[in-house]
Amino acid sequence: MSYDASFERLPISACFDLKGAESALVEWIGAEVLPEFPAKANRCCKADGVSLDHVGPRHWLLHADIDREGELNAALRPNEATPEVSIVRVSDTMTTFRIAGIDAAHVLAIGCPLDLHETAFPEDAVSFTEFFGQKALVRRCIGGFDVSVEQSFGDMLEDYLTRALR
Amino acid sequence: MMLIPCPFCGHRSESEFAYGGPVKPDRPDPHTTSDEDWVEYLTTVPNPLGPVQERWWHVKGCGTWLTIWRDTRTHDIVEGPGDAG
């Protein structure tokens, strides 16, 4: 059986790992840099090409195109952050696969235990889970899902997806 | 498969979690406790037939450590006595 889906490995994007109380992060970074904080767990808010994902208690990921990494780094000042917050540039630690097509959810279901029905995993949902045994960040994209895994597992996941989509 | 209730993510598959061992009683003072009690604390793992309190780590999810009561006969996650859970 083959699936009506395809995948591609996306180019690197800017990503910053933010930890701390929401108020402390806003105080350090400034509200004008960040999108609105998501009100619910495992949801994201987007504004001006920047996505803020609420991925854990007092834990967010800030995503943007790689050409904005320098600008965001200057605004976030990770090396000077106060002890109340932790800001780490993690752009090069993750690699992202875009799985798209009518059967994209079926391909995800091979290796991911999440309920991906749109009632449980809506458009603004984002969550760490597992995918083919690896910790993975899953989010929706147009026509499918983006799955990010640790960079060192990228080739392995590419192999798994190639076999799954044969 | 168990569905473990994560306080941040909601119910998630057991495969996203790592077992953190049973909840043990408070560590006794090794200077005042007997050798027998000290060895009991260090080496005896609770293994009841019925509910046992356990720690689990949502390692592939949000990273939260949580405590649940699991019935060893059914693997059901059950209400614990008192305010645990």
Image (spheres, coloured by chain):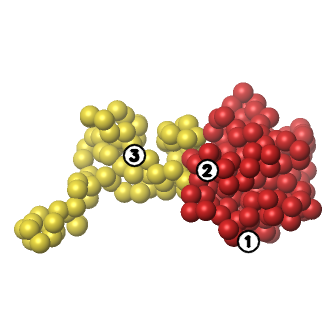
Chain colours: A red, B yellow
| Cα distance between the residues tagged 2 and 3 | 28 Å
Residue at the top extreme, as displayed: A119
**Quadrant, the C terminus of chain B:** top left
Compared with residue A105, is residue A9 higher up or lower down, i.e. above or below? below
What mark, if any, has residue A24 been given in the picture? Answer: 2
Answer whether labels 2 and 3 touch (C-beta < 8 Å).
no
Q: Nearer the viewer, residue A50 or B2?
A: A50
Residue B2's spot in the image, x, y percent? 49, 42
Do marks 1 and 2 both belong to one polypeptide chain?
yes
| Cα distance between the residues tagged 3 and 1 | 32 Å
In this rendering, the label closer to the viewer, 1 or 2: 2
Instruction: Identify which amino acid the numbered label 3 is placed on.
Output: Thr
What mark, if any, has residue B67 been given in the picture? Answer: 3
Do marks 3 and 1 both belong to one polypeptide chain?
no
Q: Earlier in the sequence, mark 1 or mark 2?
A: 2
Residue A153 figure quarter: bottom right
Q: Find numbered disc 1 in the image and state the secondary structure of the residue it sits on.
A: helix
Q: Nearer the viewer, residue A85 or A60?
A: A85
Q: Residue at x 75, y 33 (%)?
A: A122
Give left or right: position of A120 versus B13.
right
| Cα distance between the residues tagged 1 and 2 | 32 Å
Give left or right: position of A93 versus B71.
right
Answer whether labels 3 and 1 touch (C-beta < 8 Å).
no
Instruction: Identify which amino acid the numbered label 1 is placed on.
Output: Ser
What mark, if any, has residue A152 been given in the picture? Answer: 1
Q: Chain of mark 2?
A: A
Q: Residue at x 40, y 37 (%)?
A: B77
